[in-house]
Image (cartoon, helix red, strand yellow):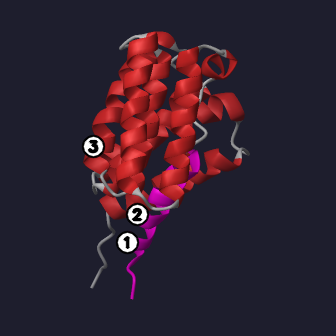
């Protein structure tokens, strides 16, 4: 029988995959340079390899995308942060959450320099880091960062947004894992 904790962590991994291939900012989407085309081609390779469950090929393409972004756009560019986020999502999907955590933290540092700190994009990457923490059973850290994501989403999208509701539910479930109630005898 699968425990609730295991089911929950598996759900978190699946939610991270949902964001996996679609994390591209509009700046890159409007960019028609050779670098942008190469990153897009690599993203397509990542998705295809991941669908075939070919982790080495997916990782190779994702790591190459990070290098292309850093070379073409700079170490601290939004494109580098995007590709790091995608590589981290891949790590997370393959249950390599400690590696994902480090990449998310680096991407957050870049994003904080370049983006509105209260943007929905920041909420997305905070969410991803929260998933990485939860998968490592760092429940209090997960709750803290997911609360950052939740507060941004509440301000920008409101309580009725489905993803906002999902984050609220995740926080509640993680809170029950981090602070289990003791039964009275």
Q: Is residue 51 left or right of residue 136?
A: right
Q: Which mark is residue 134?
A: none
Give coordinates of residue 97: x percent, y percent: 31, 50
The answer, for residue 131, to whether it is visible in the render is: no
Kindly indicate the quadrant of the structure image that contains residue 27: top right
Q: Residue at x 36, y 35 (%)?
A: 63
Q: Is-magenta flag for residue 14?
A: yes
Q: Residue at x 44, y 34 (%)?
A: 85
The answer, for residue 8, to whether it is visible in the render is: yes
Q: Residue at x 30, y 80 (%)?
A: 184
Residue 142 sits above or below residue 37 on the image = below
Please state the total of marks drawn on the protein image.
3
Check whether the beta carbons of the residues at disc 3 and disc 2 lie within 8 A of each other. no
Q: Which mark is residue 9?
A: 2
Residues in magenta? 1-19
- Which residue does the numbered mark 1 point to in the structure image? 6
Kindly indicate the quadrant of the structure image that contains residue 40: top right
Q: Is-magenta flag for residue 166?
A: no
Q: Nearer the viewer, mark 3 or mark 2?
A: 3
Q: Residue at x 45, y 62 (%)?
A: 53
- Which residue does the numbered mark 3 point to in the structure image? 99
Q: Nearer the viewer, residue 85 or 35?
A: 35
Q: Mark 2 and mark 1: span between their CA atoms?
A: 5 Å
């Amino acid at each position: 029988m699968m425990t609730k904790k295991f089911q929950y962590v598996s759900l978190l991994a699946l939610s991270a995959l949902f964001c996996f291939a679609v994390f591209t900012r509009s700046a890159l989407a409007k960019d028609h340079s050779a670098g942008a085309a190469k990153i897009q081609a690599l993203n397509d390779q990542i998705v295809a390899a991941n669908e075939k469950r070919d982790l080495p090929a997916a990782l190779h393409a994702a790591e190459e995308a990070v290098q292309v972004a850093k070379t073409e756009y700079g170490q601290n560019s939004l494109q580098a942060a995007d590709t790091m986020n995608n590589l981290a999502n891949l790590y997370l999907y393959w249950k390599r959450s400690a590696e994902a955590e480090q990449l998310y933290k680096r991407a957050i540092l870049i994003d904080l320099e370049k983006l509105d700190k209260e943007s929905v994009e920041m909420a997305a990457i905070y969410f991803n880091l929260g998933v990485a923490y939860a998968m490592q059973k760092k429940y209090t850290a997960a709750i803290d960062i997911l609360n950052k994501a939740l507060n941004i989403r509440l301000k920008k999208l409101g309580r009725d947004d489905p993803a906002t509701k999902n984050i609220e539910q995740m926080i509640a479930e993680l809170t029950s894992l981090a602070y289990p109630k003791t039964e009275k005898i």
